[in-house]
Amino acid sequence: MPAEEEPTEEPTEAPTEETTEEPGPQQLEWTELFDGIGSATVANTSTDTAYRATFDGFVTNNSWGDDSVWQGQAKKAGFAVTNGKSYKLSVGLSATPAKNMRIQALTGGQYTEKVYAIDGDTHVDFYFTAKANDVQIVIAFGSINDPGTYDIEIANMIIEEGEEPTTE
C-alpha cells in the first residue's frame, strides 16, 4: 500500500494594509472642439478649474458663405447658471496672426454674442444674463471676413456671477 501523504500547509501572505487613494483632479471637458475643414491639430488643454484648448494650423476660408464663422469653434453646453442672474465669462484668447473671434451665449432660447478683434494674447470679459438654468457657450473663430491659417488658443475660460460695469 502506498504511504499516505501528510497534508502540507500552503504559506499564506500576511494581510496587507488597505490604502485608498483619493482620485486626482479631473480635466474639464468641452462639449465639442470643432475644426470644420480638418486642418488643425486640436487639443483640450483644460485643467480641473478652467477650460483651455488649442487649434494649431487652423485653416478657415469663406467656403461656407455666411456660416464660415462656424468653421472653427469650442463649445461648452449645459453649464449650470441661475435663471435671471447676470454672468461674466472671462477668457484669454490668442490668434496668430490677428483675427476676429465671436463669443456667443445661448440660454433659454436667446442669444447674446459679440465679436472681438484678437491680436496676440487678449483678455476678454463677456457678459450675459441667464434666461434659463443652463447656458451654452460657443467661441467661434472661423472666417469673419478674414480667411487664412491661424494658431488659436483659448485659455482659462471661467464663468462667474457678475454684472457688466456701467460707464458714465
Image (spheres, rainbow, N blue to C red):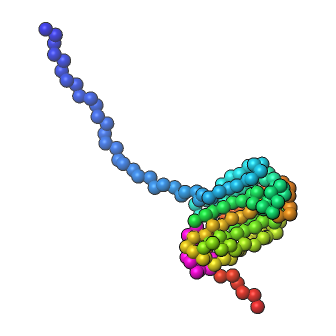
Q: Is there any visible trace of residue 121 in the rendered image?
A: no
Q: Quadrant of residue 162?
A: bottom right
Q: Is residue 55 left or right of residue 97?
A: left
Q: How many marks?
A: 0
The residue under the point 61% across, 64% down is: 77
Q: Is residue 81 magenta?
A: yes
* Residue range (magenta): 79-90
Rendered position, 83 above or below 1: below
List x then y, in percent, for residue 109.
63, 72
The answer to which of 162 and 16 lies nearer the viewer is 162
The residue under the point 69% across, 82% down is: 164
The answer to which of 145 and 97 lies nearer the viewer is 145
Q: Quadrant of residue 142?
A: bottom right
Q: Quadrant of residue 74?
A: bottom right
List x then y, in percent, for residue 35.
73, 53
Q: Is there any visible trace of residue 9 in the rendered image?
A: yes
List x then y, in percent, for residue 66.
81, 63
The residue under the point 76% across, 91% down is: 168
Q: Residue furthest top?
A: 1
Q: Is residue 51 left or right of residue 20?
A: right
